[in-house]
Amino acid sequence: MKNKNLPNGTRDEFGTQAEVKEQIQMKLLKIFKERGFRKLTTPVVEYSDVFEPLSTDNYRPYQFLDEQGETLVLRPDLTLPVARVMSTTGVDLPVKWYYSGDVFRVKKRLSGSYNQTTQAGIEIIGYKGIKADWECLAVALAGCRAMNLNDVTVEISQAKFVDTVVRQLNLPEPTGNSLKQALFAKDLSRYESLWSPLKETEFAPFLAEWPWLFGDFDKVISVVQTLPKTSELKKIIDDLIATKQFINQQFPDDQVTLDLSVRSPQSYYTGMAFRGFTGKSADYLFSGGRYDNLLTNFQKVKASAVGLAFDVDALVERTPLPPEPKQTLIYFDDQQWQLAEQKLAEVPNATLCLAETKQAAKQLADSNDSDLIDLTESR
């Protein structure tokens, strides 16, 4: 199993990366706590049916059997375990949780992806209004600011948009489904043939542009506004515009893009979804969205919910490693342990050298480019 927590280079590099990762997690958890979120811990091992709502294209889990023959998995996601805990513990709503932990996903060989990654995130459950979505975005961008990432682009999408538009077209269900598949796959010839019967309708200006409906927020919205107005569509557009204004007001240095021609990142999303990235990499720093129906997988009562998860490893990759201070080795003999402890307390960035001979201590210091203090010379 390829593990991002294992060293790719020297032990010194690994130690530095591990320290940076720990610092990033501490900063994120501090932000969560300061905004009134409570900690929730979920098991690493879960029953496989907990993750049935996940798209298996991106979240293939590691599976094994328990002694009763039940299928267990290493968690490939942290949102669903939170929903499962919520449904089984009877927590009063509303509630705001935060979490941190590793997730495990089977990746294709030679894909360059890792099978074990670390996430830190929040879940806001029991709030229907758009303020909960904005809280997630505020936490996301505040977290990036804490890592000195000031060139963040927020990509917004909307899980209901495609289905809402297709319903307005009054196409037979098989044709509507085929149109969506062609749109998502960017199969332009197939898409063209499916919508061509509507070229004389009021939907034509929009349908002609739909496969390219991503990128600059204002340009995308201007195309969307050519659609016939319905109350459901108006609510979606109004919320998207208000969200862009919110980000521009709170984080004026960040960019906002819009993608309304893409499949929902997860089948359980029911509203706005968002991802954050920097211009120098395609990997997302954070992702999240609204999933108002998710808890119904575990209970009969519907509960509004929205969540956000940081990819901690992606943040580590974008954080410059601090210069490694030169280390000092303290060499001593068996009778000088107390003296060595005193010297260790006095000298910054020092460590006890446990080599058996002075020559071995010198070789170790030379190989690590470290200073050497030889306490045996004072005897």
Image: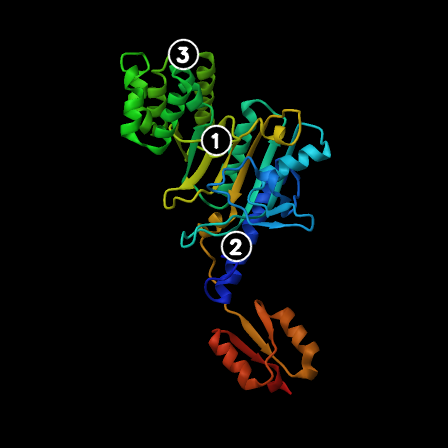
Residues packed near mark 2 inside 10 Å, few (<14), some (14 to 19) or many (20 plus): some
Amino acid under label 3?
Lys
- Provide the residue designation for mark 1: 273
Instruction: Work out how far the residue at label 1 is from the one at label 2, CA to CA, in angstroms.
Output: 29 Å
Q: Position of residue 145 (x, y in %)?
A: 49, 41
Residue at image x 65%, y 69%?
A: 345
Q: Could you tell me if residue 361 is visible in this image?
A: yes
* Residue placed most toward the observer, 16 or 293: 293
Residue at image x 41%, y 51%?
A: 111
**Residues at discs 3 and 1 in contact (Cβ within 8 Å):** no
Q: Earlier in the sequence, mark 3 or mark 1?
A: 3
Residue at image x 39%, y 44%?
A: 282
Q: Earlier in the sequence, mark 1 or mark 2?
A: 2
Amino acid under label 2?
Val
Q: Position of residue 226 (x, y in %)?
A: 34, 15
Q: On the image, which quarter does residue 352 sit in?
A: bottom right
Q: Position of residue 211 (x, y in %)?
A: 32, 28
Amino acid under label 1?
Ala
- What kind of element bears circle 1? strand
Residue at image x 70%, y 83%?
A: 335
The C terminus - image quarter: bottom right
